[in-house]
Amino acid sequence: MPLPPMTRRAALRLSAAAVLRAAGGLGAAGGLAAAGGLAACTPSPAPGPTRSSGPAPSSSGGSSGSAASGGTAAGSTASGGTASGGTGAGGAAPSSAPRVTGTIAEGLRTPWSIAFAPDGMAFVSERDTGRILRLAGDGGAPREAGKVTARKGTREGGLLGLEVSPTFAKDGLLYAYYTAAGANRVVTLTWDGTSLGGERIIVDGIPAAVVHNGGRLRFGPDGLLYIGTGDANTRTLSPDLGSLGGKILRVTPDGSPAPGNPHGTRVYTWGHRNVQGLAWDSRGRLWASEFGPERNDELNLIVAGGDYGWPAVTGGARSGSSVPAAFVWPSTANASPSGLVVVGDVAYVACLRGQRLWRFPLPGPGYVPDGSGSLPGATEHFRNEYGRLRDAVAVPGRNELWLATNADAGSRILRVEL
Ligand SMILES: [Ca+2]
């Protein structure tokens, strides 16, 4: 689905105020939110006003792998700081460190997911309000486009993932994942050019709980919808092939089991704890981020039918034929990975508790996770600068990400140049 680039007009309208707000960190955003409501900020082309401590000299040849050697040894914490990553095996991957260059919007309430429509408009979900906002690609205040009735009072449930139909220009369909009264579900809503309506449930009965609700939705290059779910705090669900919990599901656009799924059901892979990030590289490989149990957060290379180990094992360990994680964060304090995006065969992972963005040049063809839990060239950025990071998405047609921060009513969407 070719997407037109966002207008350059936004980039040319430099707003000193926006730069100052961006440079002011969360305090500024929180103050504005307290004053009431949402605000848009003109994306700023200023050179990295929020970059902390400047980029470290780029380490050539991917030797920065030592900055974040991963591994499965307890206490082997990453210490990459804001070092610029080597390009590693990424080939044509961007070689520069990501840098925040502006604030797209602020005063949002726990934005969970961002999804771009073909015309450059973006939809943003707010977890706790159930609102779906739309953001014009060239700035302007966010407007409410629609709303779902999500269950209140869960810590990690609510309105979670969004995804735009691959044929959005024709059907106007927006997919949404939310926690309903008894379970998580996936619905479609129809965009009529003004608002979203006509909600239709396409997958229901995904186990829900106060925590571990998964929630990521992404269409793959095969035109099928992939759904990351969680174990709903009941670890026996993950290896249970009859449950939709603790899985990556693969369905057709109408929610039916995808043809060719390994068990003839919606289940694509199993043995997951809580999957909140899904992305494909240029070779068509699917990567997924997953929260570990107070240790061993994971970046996984996903293969159809795979068992990803939970609850028998985590991280680089194997149980039977389970697939070890490609990269392991021994301490969740450094990660707690949610949104995942791949640009130029470099993966970026937005982290909650770790309050940073991880960057991984992805390995070349033939790569198979070897249980070491490490990938060469991994680096971390923005540590503790913007608070909890929930989602990272690529801006169509640009070498740029939008990054959703989670700071209750002071949450922001940041513009990140790569
Ligand atoms: Ca695992």
Image (spheres, grey):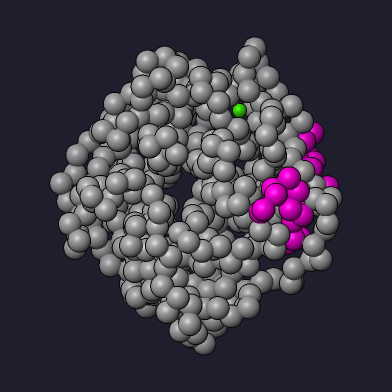
Relative height, residue 163 to residue 146 (above, below): above
Residue found 52% across the figure and 87% down from its top? 16
User: Residue 209's spot in the image, x, y percent?
Assistant: 39, 34
Q: Nearer the viewer, residue 242 or 305?
A: 305
The image position of residue 107, as x and y in percent, is: 40, 69
Does the image show residue 28? no
* Left or right: where 335 falls relative to 163: right
Task: Identify the image quadrant of residue 261.
Answer: top left
Instruction: Give the left or right position of residue 200, taking residue 124 as reference.
Output: left
> Does residue 312 show up magenta in the picture?
no
Number of marks:
0
Q: Position of residue 306 (x, y in %)?
A: 55, 21
**12 over 278 or under it: above or below:** below
**214 left or right of 172 in image:** right
Residue 365 falls in image quadrant: top right
Which residues make up the magenta segment? 66-93
Magenta stretch: dominant secondary structure: loop
Q: Residue at x 45, y 24 (%)?
A: 268
Residue 398 x/y as whole percent: 51, 63
| 229 w.r.t. 155: above or below | above
Residue 81 on the magenta segment: yes
* Quadrant in the rendering for residue 193: bottom left
